[in-house]
Amino acid sequence: LLPSNVAKTMQAPVCAIVAHDMSFWEAFPTLSPHKDVRGYFRDNAALTEETAFRNSSMQGAYLIMAARALGLDCGPMSGFDRSRVDELFFEGTSWRSNFLCNLGYGDPSALYPRNPRLAYETACRLA
């Protein structure tokens, strides 16, 4: 963890590792039996990494939305040594970490006010 993340993580009741399985494509015959797309991923490490990382990011976002809907505070962070986390928790598997997320009930007095947001026109492009 980055030094600024250590205290918050040690105080959190839960620190979830949001991860992805680099062999996710092996489950397609079960999850998507209408078309065998394993060949798209089997020999294309870049596509596999991009797809797995993107999808685990979306699933992590759903975790955060669900936790917040239940009243939990969430502290997602990318400031950690992914290689070390993978070694400690996923050694010998095809799983790789994406980000960490502290979950719990924070101290309201320690929360920052909401930061400004970019205008829609600045942050979004329609094609």
Image (cartoon, rainbow, N blue to C red):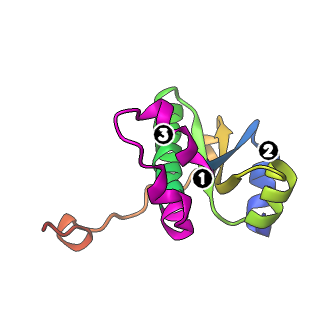
Confirm whether the magenta stretch covers residue 48: yes
- State the quadrant of the N terminus: bottom right
Q: For label 2, count other residues whose C-alpha is less than 10 Å away and answer few (under 14), some (14-19) or many (20+).
A: few
Depicted 16 relative to depicted 33: above or below = below
Q: Is residue 66 left or right of residue 96?
A: left
Q: Nearer the viewer, mark 3 or mark 1?
A: 3
Mark number displayed over residue 85: none
Specify the segment rendered in magenta. 21-50
> Camera-side residue: 97 or 48?
48
- State the quadrant of the C terminus: bottom left
Q: CA distance from mark 3 to mark 1?
A: 29 Å
Q: CA distance from mark 3 to mark 2?
A: 39 Å
Ranked by sequence position, the earlier of labels 3 and 1 is 3
Residue type at numbered disc 3: Phe
To which residue does mark 1 refer?
76
Q: Residue furthest bottom?
A: 122
Residue 12 visible in the picture = yes
To which residue does mark 3 refer?
28
> Camera-side residue: 108 or 24?
24
Q: Nearer the viewer, mark 3 or mark 2?
A: 3
x and y percentages locating residue 33 in the rendered image: 41, 32
Q: For label 3, count other residues whose C-alpha is less than 10 Å away and answer few (under 14), some (14-19) or many (20+).
A: some
Q: For label 1, count other residues whose C-alpha is less than 10 Å away and answer few (under 14), some (14-19) or many (20+).
A: some
Residue drawn where x is 57% and y is 44% of the image: 26
To which residue does mark 2 refer?
11
Confirm whether the magenta stretch covers residue 35: yes
Tag 1 secondary structure: strand
Residue type at numbered disc 2: Gln
